[in-house]
Amino acid sequence: MMKFQRVYVLGSTGSIGVNTLDVIARHPETLSVYALSAYSRIEQLAAQALATGAAVVVVPDEPARRRFTAAWPAGRTLPEIRVGAAALADTAADSQVSTVMAAIVGAAGLPAALAAAKAGKRVLLANKEALVAAGALFMKTVRDSGAELLPIDSEHNAIFQCMPHFGRAGAATHPAKGVRRLLLTASGGPFRTTLLEKLTDVTPDQACAHPNWRMGRKISVDSATMLNKGLEVIEAHWLFAMPLERIQVVVHPQSMVHSMVEYDDGSILAQLGQPDMRTPIAYGLGFPERIASGVGLLALTSLGRLDFEEPNLDRFPCLRLSFEALRAGQASCVTLNAANEIAVDCFLKQKIRYTEISRIIERCLHREVGRVRSGLDSLEEILALDAETRSFASQLCHVK
Ligand code: NAD
Ligand code: MG
């Protein structure tokens, strides 16, 4: 019988957050919401807190607190409202919390995800940028605290499901025995077959129109550039202690095979399912049991076919840059992620062209590689490099 869990959903108003609340609501006898956090959609947060009976909400500042109170219906008891980035992280260590869904977008989610790991909670990790920026520190923290780490990103969740069973969800220190390679599938996004010369003129809405998944706008642009797959290769490297040479990206336009594990004996195990994040979310919440997610089954006979192809690194320079960053080390991974966050934000605000995203990342990476630096061992050092790269990347966006 599944243990009762009180969940803290970081980024509850986002795409992953909303899907998480959907799954939790299907299991009132074993899952409950203890705390929720949001950054901008405060009225939606109030509606979620009302529906779930959350005891605590975390908002970024005083104006957001006032908006929350104003949106709250008269006569109902207000949840405890905590304010600011420190409260966001501290709530992850709250003794009432058993499980933390890390679903904030970007490196902004790193301190809270790390706090959840440090407190030894069950950590459901959607926030891949946290692992890209702080892989070694994050995995060491999980190991030291004995936290349970369950990947929610669909590819990593699929790989986790296809791995030889380790019984619990800890932090790997070496590649699992008998595993030859990880095969990470990628849809290729909306521009997989667009003429290369047309890419300079694509709009944010075109870039966000993903063929198979509905997601937040930042990750949608990342899927179009395939920087998302680059972040995921780095994420897989840390989660499964796998060297870059043993992680293969395979373009699979139907997004039905969510990823695969190739074994020494010639077997390949794959996880298939509808492209719906409630499946990996339910897997993480229920682990080691399987619980209902609300997702329908795959109608295999009406699928017709499954295609697989090599990624084209000329079409997707961001993928090549991600491989370079992982080879170069931690500082380059922090730089890759921070430069991308700024470039994508500027593209979404129509300050730069789509094709400038990879150029800005490349310039930031070259600047970083030219430097001499000692380790990036602490959260403070990582956040300092992240902030410094953001400011350099912003300058590059504005001279355009
Ligand atoms: P989203 O943009 O829909 O939601 C982001 C959430 O983070 C919102 O609740 C927002 O309020 C909060 N947030 C944003 N900036 C913040 C800040 N500075 N401080 C605190 N909170 C902040 O994003 P999403 O699509 O739900 O993605 C969330 C994370 O999950 C990302 O790291 C993404 O890469 C990962 N992920 C998403 C999907 C998906 O299907 N959407 C799939 C795999 C992985
Ligand atoms: Mg993914």
Image: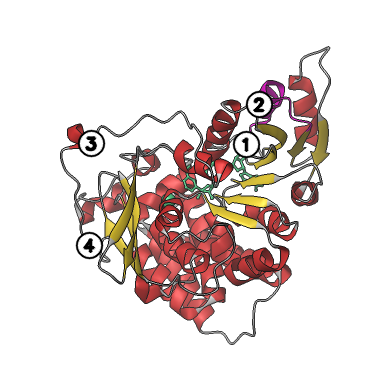
Numbered range of the magenta stretch: 41-55
| Residue 390 location, quadrant | bottom right
Is the CB of mark 1 within 8 Å of ligand 1?
A: yes
For residue 20, above or below residue 153: above
| Residue named by callout 3 | 300
| Residue named by callout 1 | 12
Q: Residue at x 22, y 56 (%)?
A: 196
| Residue named by callout 2 | 48
User: What's the amino acid at mark 3?
Assistant: Leu
For marks 3 and 4, the one nearer the N-term is: 3
- Disc 3 residue crowd, few under 14, some 14–19, many 20+, Cα 10 Å: few
SS class, disc 2: helix
Location of the N terminus (image quadrant): top right
Q: Residues under labels 2 and 4: Cα distance?
A: 42 Å
Q: Tell me, yes or no, whether the two marked residues, 3 and 4, touch with CB atoms within 8 Å.
A: no
For marks 4 and 1, the one nearer the N-term is: 1
Q: Tell me, yes or no, whether the two marked residues, 1 and 2, touch with CB atoms within 8 Å.
A: yes
For residue 171, above or below residue 160: below
For marks 2 and 4, the one nearer the N-term is: 2
The percent position of residue 382, horizontal first and vertical second, equals: 65, 69
Q: Residue at x 63, y 65 (%)?
A: 138
For marks 1 and 2, the one nearer the N-term is: 1
- Disc 4 residue crowd, few under 14, some 14–19, many 20+, Cα 10 Å: few
| Residue 52 location, quadrant | top right
| Number of the front mark, 3 or 4 | 3
Residue found at the very far front of the displayed protein? 1
| Number of the front mark, 3 or 2 | 3
The percent position of residue 313, horizontal first and vertical second, equals: 27, 66
